Image: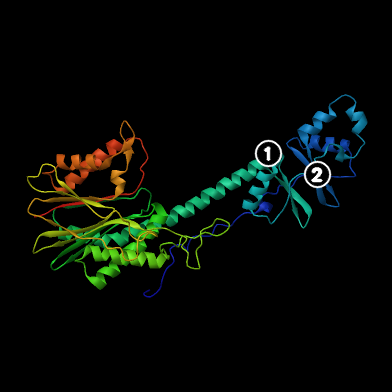
Amino acid sequence: MSGVLVDPFAARPRFRQPCAEDLAVATPSVTTDQTNQDVLEVFAVHRDLACLPVTEADRPIGLINRSIFLSQMSKPYHRELYNRKSCIAFMDKEPLVVDAAMSIDALTFRAVEYGEKALADGFIIARDGKFIGLGQGLQLMRVVADMQAERNRQIMHSIDYASTIQRAMLRTSRETLAATLPDAALVWEPRDVVGGDFYHFAAFEDGWFAALADCTGHGVPGAFMTLIASSLLTQAIEQQGPRDPGALLMAVNRGIKQMLGQMPGQMGSQPDGQLEGHGGASASDDGMDAAFFWFDNATRQLTFAGAKSALFVLQPGDAEGEMLNGARMGVGYVDTDMDFAWQNSTVPTRTGTLVFVTTDGLIDQIGGPKEIAFGKRRMREAIRASRDAPAVQISQAVLEVHRAWQGPHRRRDDLTFFCFRAR
């Protein structure tokens, strides 16, 4: 039915949070009027009973540990002395007593604070102050583990759905790139299910615009930043056009700072040490490193502006290639001036010119025998070694060298790079 929005999570049953009452196991109990002989008889009948609650007017006042009790009663003359005395003689007078409505999270904290006795002997569960059952430490740990597994499952389901949204956001750019540049390759590999890197590609009658950006963080926080930065970039292109990469970096910089309230000198803190989120002080310091470039079809010139990003250009006949460095200033951060101007650089291209740009996930990856960063030098060597191959093969060669360098080490960051050959 058209016009109806469907919540993708609505059909899933909600997970009911258990409480202490769910752990209550009905067990025998004794009253303060009963004797230690009565306790012996209860333990004799209920051989799997580890602890016996003691109540007074149905209200729990103590807990008798089976092992401790039998150990005491087995001592010489103890039965003669204590058999007819009140069962409170060997009772723990300070057991953990919790209300039936207490959440499992709160119960877990209480049990940990109470110490290992609560986990070993268990805890008494009461409703309106009256005894209803015993809870066991092992049972509590199992429930906590199940709850954590369910929470993780829900979180991963949400992240998987977020990944679908993020990939859909990038799909148009990838399809436009494939239709515009016959010899090009784009690699986008988030470290986690979603990532903090994004790319943008748009074709126009007189040329094309491309951007690679590495937002603060990775995973879910990074993915949120990609949505913010990508939408600001799209808006800037609509308003200013795609032909001035430096001006577009300025526009995105202003947008991030205004949206997140990240103005210089506004990283304030409250007396309790928490960052302020209102009243003019920013609680965040987020932004991105980026490479923006415009290719003019008529002049065959590439105009580049970078924020902590560089462009590697390998011209035909040039054995080494050239690194074109951007400004050493990130986009959107608190310390980045609102009116900071990124300068454009122009690169002439001709048939066979190879251009390569990457986020720092490629360069900063730790690996090798000395466990150091992959670095720009190894990146350039890998590109030069395959310089005559199509862009797809060059990107694959770079990935293979990079993965061999990484070896058993964990991926440090999202990995995104783009290369194309001019024709």
**Pointer 1 local density, CA inside 10 Å: few below 14, some 14–19, many at least 20:** few
Residue 144 percent location from the top left of the image: 59, 47
Judge depth for marks 1 and 2 and give the one in front.
Answer: 1
Q: Is residue 104 left or right of residue 48?
A: left
Secondary structure under tag 1 reads: helix
Secondary structure under tag 2 reads: strand
- Residue 373 visible in rendering: yes
Q: Is residue 47 left or right of residue 332?
A: right
Against 63, residue 209 (above or below) is below
- For the residue marked with disc 1, what is the amino acid? Glu
Q: Quadrant of residue 274?
A: bottom right
Residue carrying label 1? 116
In the foreground, 310 or 58 = 310
Q: How many marks?
A: 2
Q: Earlier in the sequence, mark 1 or mark 2?
A: 2
Residue located at (29% from left, 60% from top): 170
Q: Is residue 306 left or right of residue 414?
A: left
Residue 294 percent location from the top left of the image: 18, 62
Position of the N terminus, as image quadrant, is: bottom left
Residue 127 percent location from the top left of the image: 75, 56
In the foreground, 252 or 41 = 252
- Residue 165 visible in rendering: no
Against 65, residue 14 (above or below) is below
Residue carrying label 2? 62
In the foreground, 185 or 146 = 185
- For the residue marked with disc 2, what is the amino acid? Gly
Residue located at (11% from left, 51% from top): 353
Residue 356 percent location from the top left of the image: 19, 50
